[in-house]
Amino acid sequence: MPILEKETARDRDSQVLPKVPVPPLKQTLDTYLKCVQYLVKEEQFKKTKAIVEKFGAPGGVGEVLQKKLLERRDKTTNWVYDYWLEEMYLNNRLALPVNSSPVMVFPKQTFRDHKDALRFAARLIRGVLEYKGLIDERALPVEFARGQLAGTPLCMEQYYRLFTSYRYPGLKTDTLKVQTNAASSAPEHIIVACKNQFFVLDVVILTQLEKIMKMAENAEERLPPFGILTSDGRTEWAQARDVLTKDQTNRDSLALIESCVCVVCLDEPSSLVPSDTNRALLMLHGGGHEKNGANRWYDKSMQFVIGMNGICGVVCEHSPFEGIVLVQCSEFLMKYITGSPSKIVKASSIRELPPPRRLLWKCNPQIQGLLAASGDRLQRLVNNLDMDVFKFKAYGKEFIKKQKMSPDAFIQVALQLAFYKCNGRLVSTYESASIRRFQQGRVDNIRSATPEALAFVKSMTDERATFTDSEKTKRLRDAINAQTNYTIAAITGMAIDNHLLGLLKISKELNMEKPEIFCDETYLTSNQFILSTSQVPTTVEMFCCYGPVVPNGYGACYNPQSDHIIFCVSSFWENTETSSAVFVKALNEGLLEIRDLCNRSSTLATKPAGTLKVHI
């Protein structure tokens, strides 16, 4: 029986999705060698090949670990989930803003005054509660895969963590806690941040938001900016939190923040021109402690930012869910806000609600010092981020589809060309691939720096013009096919990154000496993702962005539309090898060159025989 599109998650709970597979060992090791061959020097590759062959030999270490991994698969819902969550997020000690938390930048709003902004905030909160209601009722329609291998039902678990998650800092590793009981006895509350002060909002009405603004303006009652602590490195914040929790007042305030549905940040207007790039920067880090950087609580999974001058969006703690969940929620809210008539209730009909409560903090000289240190470190991050939001207008998805090519694969190849133009080499590249076809599926990695992509970018940048258009076109198609095939392998659980991580983690659990394959320089290099990319498409005018994952890297998030593509390219100023503007210039050039190549090739293909120009 065909599955109806509108089936809900509740209906589907009975239909269990398959478990994530463990790929065959030989297949993963062969793919690994193919992926790294052109990313390291020849001598180094020879060494790696010998190490990998020894690891995969009959009766070798690899076989022992593979056997244990297969046993783990039988015993668990998803063998890679905990391993991946720790490796990708919880063990990472870097600060959440820029390094880990992606943001969605909403369309620029036009607010006449602060009351307008609060009306928008009130509607957004009503929308959040409505969307949360759908999630709690398990009434969200099940999603089905689009693009490659379309039509498969997808795991909806990530949605149930959207408003119930909190990431606690730890000295060595963080903890992601999800409140399991959706209908908990405590009434639902939202935390509102305004002028670095935090308020508990039990009932949501515009007048309550106005009271919060008034209370936040009261200078005598103003408390230090405690939110800044959450912007720090995870170990630093864990240490500071231990100091805070010595006092009962602080413990009470933390408990309220840690159990809220979401955080709503009412931001002060910024003096910056509201360009796409500036809005992205302000969403990623709030502009530092002097601006809105302390008007945040980064551990909470969803923070909705409403700037008084119309700069709005959402900041996400990434460990509970992927970008698609953020997109779906954001689009629901934008449609809700524009579609809902403002239900302004006459003040006389409202029984006098208790005023919102300001969260209180106890401070001492030690805590003052911690706040100052966190503020300084956030400022360094703010000063370091080089962001360029670039709208490529020459063409979009439609043109690419006309070439009978996958838009995602096409854009990935263009990113490789841009990097090669800047650096004359390719590097380890990460493109997130959803594995939601499986129970509790999150992501694996598509390694886009394929040997075929290298062959193509070399043909496009060869100064001696030794390649004909037909040769370049063939290489382009080969690169796109290789990328598409890797994508299909990844979304069906057959990529290599999760598998290799699983083998490494099993060796640790068995207290074995770390296998040589994981100590090898090549393995370390292959996990330094100098190019970290993802496609985050939207149907509403908004875009997603994030920072690089290594100091000498780029973050490249893209949103392909029918006639244009939005790219958000980030890097760090402190690193002299990278420059977002230089990368964007190369990307623009490359996209135009590929278009011209496609147009010339199709002209050649349609010309009658005899009129072909001979390319020398």
Image (cartoon, helix red, strand yellow):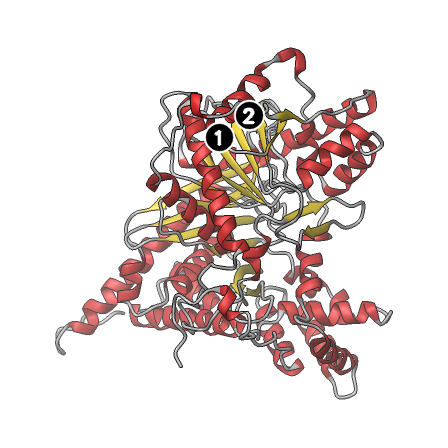
Q: Position of residue 134 (x, y in %)?
A: 48, 53
- Quadrant location, the N terminus: bottom left
Residue closest to the eye, 465 or 590 = 590
Q: Position of residue 513 (x, y in %)?
A: 86, 70
Asked whether, in this view, residue 479 is left or right of residue 263, the answer is left
Q: Quadrant of residue 574?
A: top right
How many C-alpha atoms fall within 10 Å of the one at disc 2: few (<14), some, or many (≥20)?
few
Which is more N-terminal, label 2 or label 1? 1
Q: Are marks 1 and 2 in contact (CB under 8 Å)?
A: yes
Q: Is residue 43 visible?
A: no
Mark nearest the camera among 1 and 2 is 2
Q: Residue at x 51, y 70 (%)?
A: 12
Q: Quadrant of residue 114?
A: top left
Q: Is residue 406 visible?
A: yes
In the picture as drawn, the residue positioned furthest to the top comes out as 220
Dot 1 amino acid type: Ile
Q: Residue at x 37, y 26 (%)?
A: 111
Query: In this picture, is 160 found above or below 270?
Result: below
> Quick one: SS at disc 1?
loop
Asked whether, in this view, residue 468 is left or right of residue 530, the answer is left
Q: Position of residue 322 (x, y in %)?
A: 54, 55
Question: CA–CA distance between discs 1 and 2?
Answer: 10 Å
User: What residue is disc 2 on?
Assistant: 353
Q: Position of residue 466 (x, y in %)?
A: 36, 67
Residue closest to the eye, 424 or 334 = 334
Q: Residue at x 58, y 72 (%)?
A: 495
> Quick one: SS at disc 2?
loop
Q: Residue at x 74, y 80 (%)?
A: 71
Specify the label residue 205 is tagged with. 1
How many C-alpha atoms fall within 10 Å of the one at disc 1: few (<14), some, or many (≥20)?
many
